[in-house]
Amino acid sequence: MSETTSPDLTARARLRMAALRLFAERGFEAASTRAIAAEAGVSHALLRHHFGSKEGLRRAVDEDVLDTFDRILADLDAPADGDGLMAAFGTVTARLFGADELRRDYLRRALLEGSAASGELFRRLLDGARVRLDQLRPGAGAEPGPEAESDRLWAPYQVLFLILGPMLLEPVMRHTLDQPVFAPEVLHDRSAANQRLLARGLLAPRSGRDR
Amino acid sequence: MSETTSPDLTARARLRMAALRLFAERGFEAASTRAIAAEAGVSHALLRHHFGSKEGLRRAVDEDVLDTFDRILADLDAPADGDGLMAAFGTVTARLFGADELRRDYLRRALLEGSAASGELFRRLLDGARVRLDQLRPGAGAEPGPEAESDRLWAPYQVLFLILGPMLLEPVMRHTLDQPVFAPEVLHDRSAANQRLLARGLLAPRSGRDR
DNA sequence: TTGTTTCCTGTCCACATGGATAGCCATTCT
DNA sequence: AGAATGGCTATCCATGTGGACAGGAAACAA
């Protein structure tokens, strides 16, 4: 009906984009092959021709979306020194989720469902966070100590929770903010708050310029 | 088939529990009324008799689950002094998500779907976190300052991200830990790490006893 | 021109879905 | 006793589902 995807693309690509949209908006089960085909402006039989089955379509979309995220992440592998490291997390967030509400919605469902591909993405994000944090950590300290060890385990998760939280909870957060959750301004302010949290915690926020 | 719910309950209750299970495991769309009825060991027509429609069933389950969480939260309204406040967050987590994988799964889907009821629950969690944090904050400081204001806005969210993150990401986290995400031991360790993060941040974790 | 491959559609199928109806059976009320 | 209410099932229905198939149409090779 709406045929939102540009008509000058190949039908295969249009189908993939329509599927991305409907999977993101309605979920995999609720998005029928006919609705997807209609959105792409083609017959629903063509879907089978190109992708074999609905599952095949899902795989194609999964691949497309997660590859996109992977590519974005690869771009971020700049060295990152000093507290540029902290800012890197903000950049990741902005780059990953800034635009493209559709991909946010899709990724949310994918992570929720725990698909193999999304599991792989999460693992990569986790490793990335771990590496950055290890670079940043004092490190010089002699004995690890039990708390330090626990921190080393959980810190990457904590960073990811702070980054992914707004994306995962966007549907409910939306009603508690008066601006879009991912408005550039909001995103920037939130990112700064995250950096302060990671740098000093919540309880000792000495006011005034700090670092 | 499996009829997992105890057979000495009323059929209505058994239907509600079966629905909770299947909604949690498969999602609302993918859980058919027939499958739910079979799980409860009754005819699928009975479902309609008791709940009017599948949507009615969902409402009943929603109410049940979210009321449970509300009741748990109400229990936590103890005064909470000093750093007992910090521990309170750990307690919330444990009490909310410790047991009951089913309710975790259900809540995850509800939050991601952004249903009205789950939105309400999130708002309540947010307010709770805000109140606790305000109690805890220095407060004596004169002028708020832009950073302090931003912190005051985002701190409750940050706390919630840390608490809800493991529940939301459990399906993918599962593969990155060698123990269950919500094993009591793991939960306790993670909670302690969260408290350290909130107290001091990630970058200045002076080792040794601290507070 | 032909033949061939690739894209694409119309149409049919078997099946599962949520819902509706009619009625059985037990309990309770009078 | 008889009536009535509420829990429960069997069965039917219209619709939508993913998939299968046959063949049209168009591009490209010879």
Image (cartoon, coloured by chain):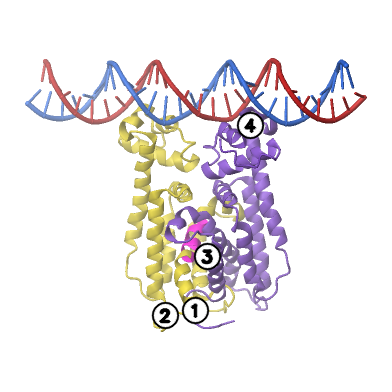
Chain colours: A yellow, B purple, C red, D blue
Magenta region, mostly helix, strand or loop? helix
Looking at the rendered structure, whether the residues under marks 1 and 3 are on a common chain is answered as: yes
A195 or B149: nearer the eye?
A: A195
Mark 4 residue type: Val
User: Which mark's residue is nearer the viewer, 2 or 3?
Assistant: 3
**Residue B72 pos. (x, y %):** 69, 57
Q: On the image, which quarter does residue B73 sit in?
A: bottom right
Identity, as a three-letter code, of the amino acid under mark 3: Val
Residue on which disc 3 sits: B186
- Residue that appears at 60% across and 50% down: B103
What is the magenta range? A158-166
Residue A122, x across and y down, in percent: 41, 57
Q: Judge whether residue A160 is colored magenta.
A: yes
Chain at tag 3: B
Quadrant location of the N terminus of chain A? Answer: top left
Q: Name the residue beneath numbered marker 4.
A: B42
**Disc 4 with disc 3 on a shared chain:** yes
What residue is shown with label 2?
A: A138
